[in-house]
Image (cartoon, rainbow, N blue to C red):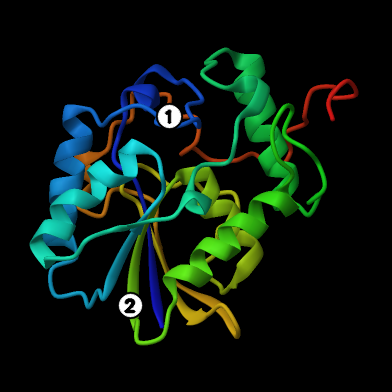
Amino acid sequence: MRLLLLRHGQTHSNVSGALDTAFPGAALTDLGRRQADAVVQALDGTSIDTIAVSNLLRTAETAHPIATALALTPAEHDGLREITAGDFEMRADEEAVFGFLGTIADWLDGDLDLRMPGGETCTEFLARYDDAIARVCTDGVAAALVVSHGAAIRTWVTHRASGEHAPIHEGLHNTGCIVLDGSPEEGWAIVAWDREPIGGDWLDDEQAPDPTGGDLDPDDEVPDQSSGS
């Protein structure tokens, strides 16, 4: 089957640079709504049997225009939510952003048992995301659109998909999209990785800090977490 992993549109937290991962999360900005509207034309003619979103507001708002156009009701799966920021939640300072992204960079390099301070390990994240994707990929579904989150999508794809199109540490901007072919049982292959908004580069906001959508430096180091559990 085909799996389209679409990052949500821009939120107010993306603009402020805050690590916003808890329920319900920030709403879309005006630009975010334009990005969501543009997804309809960008995916015009694309076969989509089902749409899935996380439990965070921004994914439902992003999915609404295309769900309306296709007369589909998005299914909500809690497991598709963003990687939990834990002790860094709603912080935008350098130490927090560095700690969050540095932890994920280590996950991408194979340290699956490293815990986000106050949050989850990569092993725990992958388990709940795997479960959500399996629920999306039910019998009779040939193509699914999953509206999820920047760090979550990239981390899951890195560990669950293969292909020469996989720039492991490359960013995924608002309404960027990664396309996979395969299945939960047989594995996934990367077909395309569009880091910019699929509605057009003109919808990108290069001035927004957007910490969960930027490049992940493989040389990042995580601050001392000896007091974490």
* Amino acid beneath label 2: Ala
Label 1 Cα neighbours within 10 Å, binned few <14 / some 14-19 / many ≥20:
many
Compare residues 188 and 81 and report the one nearer the observer. Answer: 81
Q: Are marks 2 and 1 in contact (CB under 8 Å)?
A: no
Above or below for 204 versus 108 = above
Where residue 36 appears, as percent x and y from the top left, is 20, 46
User: Would residue 3 be found to the left or right of residue 223 on screen?
Assistant: left
Residue drawn at x 65%, y 50% as measured from the top left:
125
Q: Position of residue 130 (x, y in %)?
A: 59, 64
Q: Is residue 206 left or right of residue 82?
A: left
Instruction: Residue under label 1, please give it.
Output: 210
Element marked by disc 1: loop
Identify residue type, mark 1.
Asp
Query: In the displayed structure, does residue 211 sit left or right of residue 155?
Result: left
Question: Which residue is farthest top?
Answer: 93
Residue holding disc 2: 143
- For the residue pair 6 and 133, the one nearer the viewer reads as 133
Q: Is residue 98 above or below residue 198?
A: above
Q: Residue at x 78, y 54 (%)?
A: 110
**Which circle marks residue 116 in the picture?**
none
Identified at 31% across, 48% down, the residue is 175
| Residue at the spot 55% in from the left edge and 16% down from the top edge | 91
Q: Is residue 208 visible?
A: no
Q: Specify the farthest residue to the right.
A: 226
Q: Marks 2 and 1, how far apart in space?
A: 29 Å
In this rendering, the answer to whether 127 lies above or below 96 is below
The kind of secondary structure element at disc 2 is strand
Q: Position of residue 195 (x, y in %)?
A: 39, 51
- Residue 95 image offset from top left, x and y in percent: 66, 16
Nearer-N-terminus badge (2/1): 2
Q: Quadrant of the N terminus?
A: bottom left
Q: Closer to the camera: disc 2 or disc 1?
A: 2
